[in-house]
Amino acid sequence: MRPVRLGILTPSSNTVLEPLSTAMAAELPNVTLHFSRFRVTEIALTDAALAQFDEAAVLQAAALLADARVDAIAWSGTSASWLGFDRDAALCRSIHAATGIPATSSILALNEALACSGVQRIGLMTPYRDDVQARIVANYAAIGVECVAERHLRLQDNFSFANVNGAQLEQMCREVAEAAPQAIAIVCTNLRAAPLVAKLEAALGLPVYDSVATALWKSLCLAGADPALITRWGSLFRLPALLPPARLH
């Protein structure tokens, strides 16, 4: 099999997505992951916090990944969920224009997964503040995806998200499942939720889409690799054919 190199853009204070992405990709011996960071330390709606996601910093990190001749670049972050989905669509176009490499993001991939599986009612789980969570719920409502239940932890320090334990994450998923959503969306790439997905899907009887996994899933698709070869990390990797690009955003 030909070697596949995936580039992943990482928030500087994130300690979760690199080991989890690498663990998921371990089932694919021809795939290697390569990471580039830019500064993100807090999640809030202040001017300083929002400025962390200015395109220039992200493009600089993407250019470093391009030096490694990766086959796809993914922004493994969820900022577009509160900034607006068009932000990631524009960012991915800019990355492609600057590097010639196809690009995606956790949120664009999550939205594609929801559309591919016909999901219009979600249970939403994040570690974010009240105002950030409200913005996410509103953005999904604007594209016809209703949040029927949500849980969030009112945290702001990005580093702290990694300290949320698995038992708490599992309990939050079970609570939103009581509202009978069509899927659960775990929105944050610094939560250690991906290892719980297969267990939760079996127990709850509905798909659980984790944003670390969505970035990897779509990256594999863009690189021409088969995500279905990842067998232990949930139903996401077995989703059917992708939507045409015009419907992804």
Image (spheres, rainbow, N blue to C red):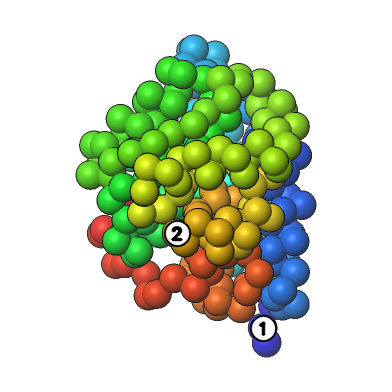
Residue drawn at x 30%, y 30% is 138
First of labels 2, 1 by sequence position: 1
Label annotation for residue 2: 1
Residue drawn at x 68%, y 55% is 195
| Residue 153 placement (x, y as % from top left) | 57, 25
Residue drawn at x 66%, y 36% is 168
Corner quadrant of residue 230? bottom right
Label annotation for residue 10: none
In the image, residue 104 above or below residue 139: below
26 on left or right of 199: right
Q: Which residue is mark 2?
A: 206
Q: Residues within 10 Å of mark 2 (few under 14, many from 20)?
A: some
In the image, residue 215 above or below residue 84: below
| Residue 29 placement (x, y as % from top left) | 75, 77
Corner quadrant of residue 161? top right
Q: Nearer the viewer, mark 2 or mark 1?
A: 2
As rendered, which of 83 and 136 lies closer to the eye? 136
Q: Secondary structure at mark 2?
A: loop
Q: Secondary structure at mark 1?
A: loop
- For the view shown, which residue lies furthest in the bottom direction? 1
- The answer to whether residue 174 shows anywhere in this view is yes
- The answer to whether residue 36 shows anywhere in this view is no
In the image, residue 5 above or below residue 96: below
| Residue 109 placement (x, y as % from top left) | 44, 55
Q: Which amino acid type is shown beneath numbered disc 1?
A: Arg
Q: Marks 2/1: CA distance?
A: 34 Å
